[in-house]
Image: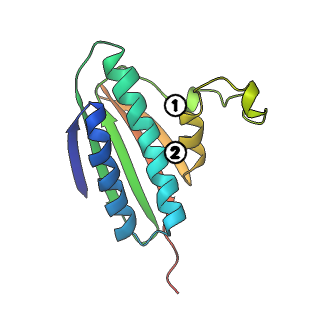
Amino acid sequence: MQSLIVPGILDSLSEIGQFVNAAASAAGLEKKVAYRLRLAVDEIATNIIIHGYEDAGLSGDVGVLVEMDAVALTITLEDSSGPFDPRAFADPDHIYKPIEERPIGGLGVFLSKNNVDRFDYEYVNGHNRNIFVINRPKPS
């Protein structure tokens, strides 16, 4: 298992993205799949930093854990902000409306949950764990 711990600040998003890209490459993911994974992780990491830490007047770290086996690549984001289960966040009802009728924002969690093969969440010992699973390509 590989891990990265960065401060929970917006400047850390680039480092998280590079770490996820490296894991996706090591897992042999196609570029389109790797992009979807990075987008999903980036959206949740941004929410952790802005809403979990900054808006709440808190500071903390974001841990990124990578696990890989023959079947899947799993990325886990871990933070110590208040509990927030993205799975409980309803999908936006405006997703299929014309752009001019959509409000700004509200798509990050939707994109995260729908751009990976499995999305899980758990709150353990005062830490949120957002878990992104992407199936690896089957060997030829």
Whether residue 120 sits left or right of residue 99 in the image: it is left
- Residue sitting at 49 percent across and 66 percent down? 31
Whether residue 26 sits left or right of residue 28 in the image: it is left
Q: Position of residue 93 (x, y in %)?
A: 74, 27
Q: Position of residue 58 (x, y in %)?
A: 26, 16
Looking at numbered disc 1 in the image, what kind of residue is underneath it?
Pro
**Label 1 Cα crowd, 10 Å radius (few <14 / some 14-19 / many 20+):** some
- Residue sitting at 48 percent across and 47 percent down? 39
- Residue sitting at 49 percent across and 42 percent down? 120
**Is any part of residue 94 visible from this angle?**
no
Which residue bears the numbered disc 2? Answer: 119
Name the disc covering residue 77, or none: none
Q: Are marks 2 and 1 in contact (CB under 8 Å)?
A: yes
Could you tell me which quadrant the N terminus lies in?
A: bottom left
Q: In this orientation, which residue lies closer to the viewer: 100 or 10?
A: 100
- The relative height of residue 72 versus residue 108 in the rendered view (above or below) is below
**Is any part of residue 116 visible from this angle?**
yes
Which residue bears the numbered disc 1? Answer: 86
Q: Position of residue 137 (x, y in %)?
A: 51, 73
